[in-house]
Image: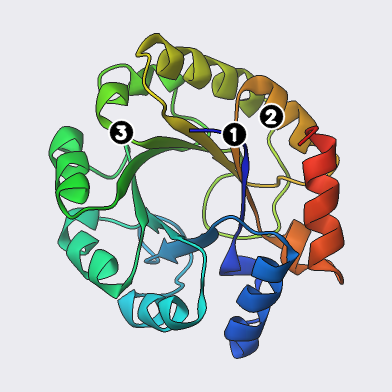
Amino acid sequence: MSGIRLAPSILSADFAALGRDIAAAERGGADLIHVDVMDGHFVPNITIGPPVVQAIKRVATRPLDVHLMIEEPDRYIDEFVAAGASMVSVHVEAVPHLHRSVAHIKALGVKAGVVLNPSTPAAMLEDIAPDVDFVLVMSVNPGFGGQSFIPSTLPKIAEARRIIDRGGRPIRLEVDGGVKVDNIGAVAAAGADTFVAGSAIFGAGDYTSTIAAMRRAIGY
């Protein structure tokens, strides 16, 4: 594992021109395409399901990072992997048998991640960290794009990094929520190496310049 990765979130893209926006983000330097799946129950919003992921897979050339913000994610993991997900993450708050869920994702041949909401302590990673490929720390309360970064998540990102590093495995630490050019440096300094940005990228007129500015802000 090496380097940082930027993952534009299509939650803030133009859904009427999703293929165009994804292609533009990829030309601009995106490393992943982040896909937020919401069910209106686990979070107060509804977004997309496997058919849309399948359509995205036909146009995207970068791996699809599928974030399941849904109740009972185990029921749908197979469908999202079949639709084209390269990475699947589930919330620790939504899964009663987390090790089983992570093992199932990995058995399907894709990267498995676990997600922490802002109010969920990093200590929840202690038992599951040895089994995952990546950890995603939410720096906003999930459900809607365009929210402001919660500064109190920075110490939790640092604690998550310490827990991950104790295991000695190359596990990535992803952060999602309110990440912008003016705070991405602090997020990186806390230990993150993968950065989800929605409105900061898709709300900008020039994706290439914004992604380049983010890379400069973290010295990469």
Mark 1 to mark 3 CA distance (whole Å): 15 Å
> According to the image, label 3 marks what residue?
132
Quick one: label 2 or label 1, which is nearer the N terminus?
2
Percent of width and height locating residue 192: 60, 30
Quick one: label 1 or label 3, which is nearer the N terminus?
3
Residue density around tag 2, few if under 14, some if 14–19, many if 20 or more, within 10 Å: many
> According to the image, label 2 marks what residue?
188
For the question of whether residue 54 can be seen, the reply is yes
Residue at image coords 81%, 63%? 208
The image shows a total of numbered marks equal to: 3
The structure's colour scheme is rainbow
Residue at image coords 35%, 23%? 125
Query: Disc number at residue 193?
Result: 1
Residue at image coords 61%, 36%? 3
Percent of width and height locating residue 22: 61, 74
Mark 3 to mark 2 CA distance (whole Å): 20 Å
Q: Which element is circle 1 on?
A: loop
Q: Report whether 79 appears left or right of 22.
A: left
The image quadrant that residue 73 belongs to is bottom left
In the image, residue 78 sits, relative to residue 6, either above or below, namely: below
**Residue 104 or residue 141, whichever sits in front:** 104
Residues at badges 2 and 1 in contact (C-beta under 8 Å)? yes
Residue at image coords 62%, 27%? 153
